[in-house]
Image (cartoon, grey):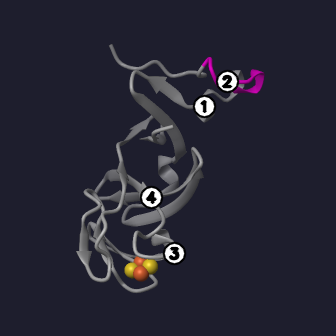
Amino acid sequence: MGPTYGPNPETATAADTHTRKRVNVTEAGHNWCPLIAAAEVEEDDVLCVRACGRNLAVFHIDGDYHVTDDRCTHEEASLSDGYLQDDTIECPRHQGVFHVPSGKPMAAPVTQPLRVYPARVEDGQVWADIPE
Ligand code: FES
């Protein structure tokens, strides 16, 4: 049986009953967080979204959505300000490159992989499974 969407009884407030897409959905071993309307992330673009206590990069590549940490693993830089080419993102600070779907470092100076979160689109929203 698939997940049911609605307020998480552990975190929901009275206001959440009217904004059900804004609360997390907890299913066994998962914490699905709503990030942004899918239509707001244009094809071949990336946006930074603050959600679930993290700065996340939401990518829209070839019709698929990918969610990673926004911070480069090399030093302090926002990857959503970088250069997206095909399925790689080039960091704006020192031009390190990551493979977006896997987070694998592709070019120096980055050596540590980028954290990638499971993502899906449901009810027009991009969701990511962000550990609590
Ligand atoms: S901060 Fe990203 S490559 Fe250096």
Classify mark 2: helix, strand or loop: loop
Q: Which residues are magenta?
A: 9-16
Q: Tell me where residue 43 sits by quadrant.
A: bottom left
Kindly identify the amino acid type of the residue bearing the numbered disc 2: Ala
Label 3 packing within 10 angstroms: few (<14), some (14-19), many (20+): few
Q: Earlier in the sequence, mark 1 or mark 4?
A: 1
Residue at label 1?
Answer: 23
Look at the numbered discs 3 and 4 and tell me whether their residues touch, using CB distance below 8 Å: no
From the image, give the main secondary structure of the stretch colored magenta: loop
Q: Earlier in the sequence, mark 2 or mark 1?
A: 2
Amino acid on which disc 3 is placed: Glu
Residue 76's tag is 3
> Type of residue at label 1?
Val
The numbered disc on residue 12 is 2
Q: Is mark 3 within 8 Å of ligand 1?
A: yes
Quarter of the image where the N terminus is located: top left
Give yes or no for contact between labels 2 and 1 (Cβ–Cβ under 8 Å).
yes
Instruction: Please report the residue visible at 65 percent of the width from the left and 25 percent of the height from the top.
Output: 11
Comes first in the chain, label 4 or label 2: 2
